[in-house]
């Protein structure tokens, strides 16, 4: 089983990034997928999630209207489009796949928002 995140980097405030998470080794289309982030010295927090079919999404309040989660079950990939980035969005971003009795985490990708 693998979840491999990519797309992180350094961006100026107000900029955009798109994170990708490529899954393998499990039946991706049966899993709810989510993005989490952890800033230095802080707890890991849920940022956004998407149901297995893509029909339902959730966003934490701090990213509503700026971030969009999506998935492509044919490509076994989940995305996080991040717009209007703020310095407080700086964190390591992790993707997670979950269904009852099973969950998997990626290794994370760093996002730094700084001028």
Image: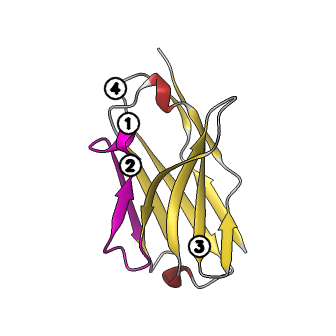
Q: Residue under circle 4?
A: 14
Q: Residue under circle 3?
A: 98
Determine whether the residue tagged by mark 4 lies in a helix, strand or loop: loop
Which residue is at 48% across, 32% downward?
89
Q: Quadrant of residue 52?
A: bottom left
Which one is earlier in the sequence, the residue at label 1 or at label 2?
1
Q: Quadrant of the N terminus?
A: bottom right
Q: Mark 3 Cα within 10 Å, few/some/many (few <14, many 20+)?
A: some
Residue 51 percent across, percent down from the top left: 41, 73
Q: Residue under circle 1?
A: 16
Q: Work out how far the residue at label 4 is from the one at label 1, CA to CA, in angstroms.
A: 7 Å
Determine whether the residue tagged by mark 2 lies in a helix, strand or loop: strand
Q: Is residue 56 left or right of residue 40?
A: left
Q: Residue under circle 2?
A: 81
Residue 45, magenta (yes or no): no
Q: Nearer the viewer, mark 4 or mark 3?
A: 3
Residue 75 appears in view: yes
């Amino acid at each position: 089983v693998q979840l491999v995140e990519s797309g992180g980097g350094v961006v100026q405030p107000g900029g955009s990034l798109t994170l990708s998470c490529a899954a393998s080794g499990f039946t991706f289309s049966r899993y709810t997928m989510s993005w989490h982030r952890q800033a230095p010295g802080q707890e890991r927090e849920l940022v956004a999630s998407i149901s297995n079919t893509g029909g339902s999404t959730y966003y934490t309040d701090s990213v509503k209207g700026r971030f969009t989660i999506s998935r492509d079950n044919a490509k076994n990939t989940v995305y996080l489009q991040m717009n209007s980035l703020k310095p407080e969005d700086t964190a390591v971003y992790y993707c997670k796949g979950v269904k009852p009795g099973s969950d998997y985490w990626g290794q994370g990708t760093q996002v730094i928002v700084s001028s």
